[in-house]
Image: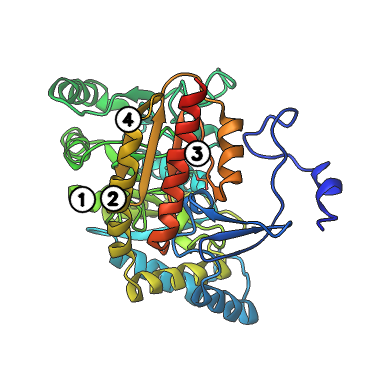
Amino acid sequence: MSDWLTPGLAHLWLPYTQMQTAAPPLPVVASAGVRLRLADGRELIDGISSWWTACHGYSHPHIRAAIEAQLATLPHVMFAGLVHAPAARLAQRLAALLPGDLERVFFTESGSVAVEVALKMAIQYWRNKGQPEKQRIVYFRHAYHGDTFATMALCDPEEGMHTLFAGTMPDQIMAELPTDENLRRAFDLLLETQGGRLAAVIIEPLVQGAGGMQMHDAATLACVAAACARHGVLLIADEIMTGFGRTGRMFACEEAEVTPDIVCLSKALTGGTLPLAATVARRHVFEAFLSDDPAAALMHGPTYMANPLACAAANASLDLFASEPRLTQVAAIEAQLREQLAPCRDIPGVAAVRVKGAIGAVELGGPVDLGALRRRCIELGVWLRPFGNLLYLMPPFVIESGDLATLTAAVRQVLDERARQH
Ligand SMILES: *Cc1c(COP(=O)(O)O)cnc(C)c1O
C-alpha cells in the first residue's frame, strides 16, 4: 500500500512533535477540493486548510494551469539584477489591493522570514533617518509571529518557546492589547515613555492565530494604529494568517481603516500551493532607504526570493478572488459557524466559543488530551488539529454547507464525548 512509509518515517523529524510518544502521522496521497485522501483510501474533510493556506480548496484547475505554464518557460531564476513578469505583476496587484500607499513589495519564502524582513526594515528605517537608538519592538500578549529567533522573541512568552531559548533571543517588550480605557492609557504611556527607543509595534490584526485564536475588535486595532502615529513608532501588521479574506475582508486592517507602515503576507498568498511571502512597505518607509550611501540599502536577499512558480500561483490565486465570490463565501461560512458552534457553549468543559470570518474556535477548560481529540476527529472523517486548549475550524472558502456541517457536528460530538468521560 504505502511501501515508502515505514522506511521513510525512520528518517523524518516532524514539527512540534514528541517523536517518542506521538501517534504516527497519516500517509496522505492526494488532495482535491476540501478532501485529503489517505493511502488506505479513506478521505478526510480538511477543516484547517493545511495550516490556513488552501483558501480555494486543493488542486484548483486555474492555479494548476498557471503553475504548469510557468514551469514550461521559467521555473526559477535569481532575483538580483533580474526581474520577471510573475513577480512584477504580483507586486503591482498587491499594491493595488492593499490600503493606502502600501506599494513596495519585498518577496521571501516563508512567513517568519517576511516578519524578519519587516523588523530589518523598521530598524534600518530609523537608522537611515538618524535615529539608530530606535531598535526595540513592542508585541502583544498571545502573539505569534514565527519560529525563527527574532520572531520567537515576539511570541507570547508563556505560549511561545521563550523558556527553551532563554538568553539567546533579542529582548523585546510585551504589551497588553488596549481593549479598554485603562489598557488604552497604559499602552499610550508605554509608547510615550519608550518611544525614543522603539522602532515598531507588531500586531496580528483582529485575530491572533497560533497564540490561541484570540479576537479583538476594529476599535482596538485603530487605537494601536493611532498611538503609533502619535508617538512616532512604525506599525507592522502581520496579516500572514488574516490576509486574503480569512476575517471577512481581503485584509483585516481594512475593517479598522488602518494603513500600517509595513504588512507581512504569506499563508494563503499562493492559495496553499507553493511557499511564498511578501513584506510590503508604505512609500515613506521605502523612501528612507533611498540615498547616495550603499549601506542605506535594505540588506536582505533569500536565494529563492520571488520564485516565478510561486508568483504565478499567487497571481492565479488573486484571479480567483476576482472571478469567484470568495468574500461572500466567507460571510456564509461565518454565519454557519456562529449558528452551529453556538451549542458548544452548553457542553461542560467548554470555556469559550469565538467566531470571526471563516475562523471558528472552541476554547476548552481543564486538561486537554490532544492525542485523544485528534484520534476521534480522524475516526469521524475530519482533519482537525487541536493545539493547546483549542479546537478550531478554518476551512477552505469553497467548502459546501453540507461538508461544513459535518465539521461542526464532529466538533460538537468530540466535545460531548469528552464531557461524558469527565
Ligand atoms: C504562520 C504565521 C507566521 C509564520 O509563518 P511561517 O511561514 O510558518 O514561517 C507568522 N505570523 C503569523 C500571524 C502566522 O500565522
Q: Amino acid at mark 3?
A: Gly
Disc nearest the viewer among 4 and 3: 4
Task: Assess disc 2: are there few (<14), some (14-19) or many (≥20) residues with their C-alpha within 10 Å of its C-alpha.
Answer: many
Q: Where is residue 358 drawn, in percent x and y?
A: 35, 52
Q: Amino acid at mark 1?
A: Glu
Which residue is labeled 2 in the image? Answer: 252
Q: Amino acid at mark 4?
A: Asp
Write down the quadrant of residue 176 in the picture: top left
Task: Assess disc 4: are there few (<14), some (14-19) or many (≥20) residues with their C-alpha within 10 Å of its C-alpha.
Answer: few
Q: Earlier in the sequence, mark 2 or mark 3?
A: 3
Label 1: state its secondary structure. Answer: helix
Residues tagged 2 and 3 counted as in contact (Cβ below 8 A): no
Q: Residue at image x 22%, y 25%?
A: 187
How far, Cα to Cα, is label 2 from label 3? Answer: 19 Å
How far, Cα to Cα, is label 4 from label 2? Answer: 30 Å
Q: Where is residue 29 drawn, in percent x and y?
A: 70, 60
Q: Residue at image x 61%, y 31%?
A: 371
Q: Where is residue 147 drawn, in percent x and y?
A: 54, 36
| Label at residue 255 | 1
Q: Report whether 80 appears left or right of 211.
A: right
Which residue is labeled 4 in the image? Answer: 346
Q: Where is residue 270 drawn, in percent x and y?
A: 49, 63
* Res. 313 visible in picture: yes
Pointer 3 residue Cβ closer than 8 Å to ligand 1 = yes
Which residue is labeled 3 in the image? Answer: 146
